[in-house]
């Protein structure tokens, strides 16, 4: 067993707040542990200030399916009062009130922002509405949690990030993998060299459904199925790639310098405007590459990120890692398999100098000692609450969310233009983790 915590992680309840803190402490986060370099945003759990007696007054703008998913975590947090919700769609309001029956309801989010008792807001509205809501919220002095992708285009993302800096409000984005224990531990292992030199990252997110939601009447089609139309969405890149591209740069510790890609509508020819399949290729200045793709007409391989190293591979979504060299087979089984190969394989005709490069059976090891059963959404919302109460912005959280948004929007632009595009250096920000200043120099 590589890590001593693997024995007790199997029986602990990650959803319990005290156990989460215990888990983080044993990972080496609390008290200035070794994870500070790879996941510095976790410092928000270091108990610098006791917040046990505090109650954050929170407003939710956009309590749709994702908004309500996050509300369920927040409603369980004893440090949160969800005091208001804002939406223009009554069915979403009705379902949100089942979670927080006492919340005040607004049809205009600006009236919610005008309430001086509200300290923070969760924004989970369609992509094309994020920018104005977030800018207004920050101008009103509210701490902001905004679902990814943060902006509809790269210019909006930069202006939102700059507004965060100028107002000093806390700014979180919906990148839950940053708080997922599997990914936290994996990144420590990757950066410690456990898997050797990382040579490539490839990721995909496949489904087999039309991505449509039921529409009660035709006039609401583009309102409810906003993800399928160009005026309100960038499709698979902004809804799915945003999560996984961030994993790649987190692992490689740098930004790519070039991207190319292709997208099309191959299967779901139902009037949608966004692609139903995409392939992208990100290239780094040292020659390493990151691939991302999605196909929503085949779900066999589901979703995964593969971090490929010279001595091992990680599949964090699956919750496993695999070393290149595995324990030898028992002699008898090895003899039987060699005998089967001699009889049934045609590789013998090429002589002993050639052997087919087939994958070896390798069941790997669980990163946390067990099959994963949750993502980092609960810890992410808890971290936002802690940060909003203290008014302390955790290191790196806004920057990681910003660059994840830039990467997927940049990739989308390359697909639409049908060109290989250089990284848009005008959207670089001051972030030492990715060597932004050095990267600007490299691109100049």
Image (tube, rainbow, N blue to C red):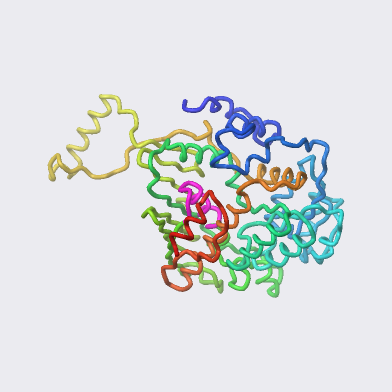
Range of residues picked out in magenta: 241-255
Q: How many badges with numbers are in the image?
A: 0
- Residue 299 among magenta residues: no
The image shows residue 415 at horizontal and vertical percentages of: 46, 69
Relative side of 89 to 7, left or right = right
The image shows residue 326 at horizontal and vertical percentages of: 34, 32
Determine the image quadrant of residue 173: bottom right
Determine the image quadrant of residue 5: top right
Magenta stretch prevailing secondary structure: helix
Between 291 and 169, the one lying in front of the other is 169
Residue displayed at 61% across by 67% down: 152
- Quarter of the figure with the C terminus: bottom left
Between 291 and 27, the one lying in front of the other is 27
The image shows residue 142 at horizontal and vertical percentages of: 77, 56
Residue displayed at 42% across by 60% down: 281
The image shows residue 365 at horizontal and vertical percentages of: 45, 33
Residue displayed at 54% across by 39% down: 182
Vertical order, 426 against 59 (above or below): below
Between 135 and 299, the one lying in front of the other is 135
Vertical order, 123 against 333 (above or below): below
Relative side of 365 to 59, left or right = left
Residue displayed at 33% across by 34% down: 325
């Amino acid at each position: 067993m590589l890590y001593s915590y693997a024995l007790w992680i199997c029986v602990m309840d990650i959803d319990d707040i005290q156990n989460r803190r215990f888990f983080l402490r044993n990972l080496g986060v609390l008290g200035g542990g070794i994870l500070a370099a790879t996941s510095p945003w976790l410092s928000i759990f270091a108990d610098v200030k006791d917040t046990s007696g505090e109650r954050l007054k929170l407003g939710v703008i956009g309590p749709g399916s994702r908004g309500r998913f996050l509300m369920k975590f927040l409603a369980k947090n004893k440090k949160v009062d969800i005091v208001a919700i804002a939406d223009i769609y009554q069915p979403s309001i009705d379902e949100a009130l089942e979670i927080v029956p006492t919340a005040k309801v607004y049809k205009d989010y600006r009236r919610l922002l005008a309430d001086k008792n509200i300290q923070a807001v969760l924004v989970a509205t369609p992509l094309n509405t994020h920018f104005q809501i977030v800018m207004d919220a920050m101008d009103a002095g509210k701490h902001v949690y905004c679902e990814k992708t943060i902006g509809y285009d790269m210019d909006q993302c930069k202006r939102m990030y700059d507004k965060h800096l100028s107002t000093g409000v806390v700014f979180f984005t919906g990148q839950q993998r940053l708080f997922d224990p599997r990914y936290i531990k994996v990144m420590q292992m990757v950066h410690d060299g456990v898997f050797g030199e990382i040579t490539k990252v490839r990721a995909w997110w496949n489904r087999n459904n039309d991505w449509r939601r039921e529409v009660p009447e035709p006039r609401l089609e583009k309102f409810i199925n906003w993800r399928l139309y160009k005026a309100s969405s960038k499709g698979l890149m902004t809804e799915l790639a945003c999560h996984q591209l961030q994993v790649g740069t987190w692992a490689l510790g740098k930004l790519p310098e070039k991207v190319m890609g292709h997208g099309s509508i191959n299967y779901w020819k139902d009037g949608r405007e966004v692609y139903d399949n995409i392939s992208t290729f990100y290239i780094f200045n040292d020659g390493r590459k990151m691939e991302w793709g999605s196909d929503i007409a085949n779900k066999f391989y589901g979703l995964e990120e593969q971090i490929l190293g010279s001595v091992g591979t990680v599949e964090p979504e699956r919750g496993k890692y695999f070393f290149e060299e595995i324990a030898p087979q028992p002699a008898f089984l090895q003899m039987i398999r060699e005998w089967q190969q001699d009889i049934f394989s045609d590789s013998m005709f090429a002589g002993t100098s050639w052997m087919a490069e087939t994958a070896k059976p390798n069941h790997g090891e669980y990163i946390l000692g067990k099959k994963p059963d949750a993502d980092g959404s609960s810890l992410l919302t808890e971290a936002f609450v802690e940060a909003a109460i203290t008014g302390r912005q955790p290191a790196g959280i806004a920057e990681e969310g910003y660059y994840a948004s830039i990467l997927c929007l940049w990739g989308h632009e390359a697909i639409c233009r049908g060109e290989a595009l250089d990284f848009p250096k005008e959207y670089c920000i001051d972030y030492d983790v990715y060597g932004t200043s050095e990267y600007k120099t490299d691109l100049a």
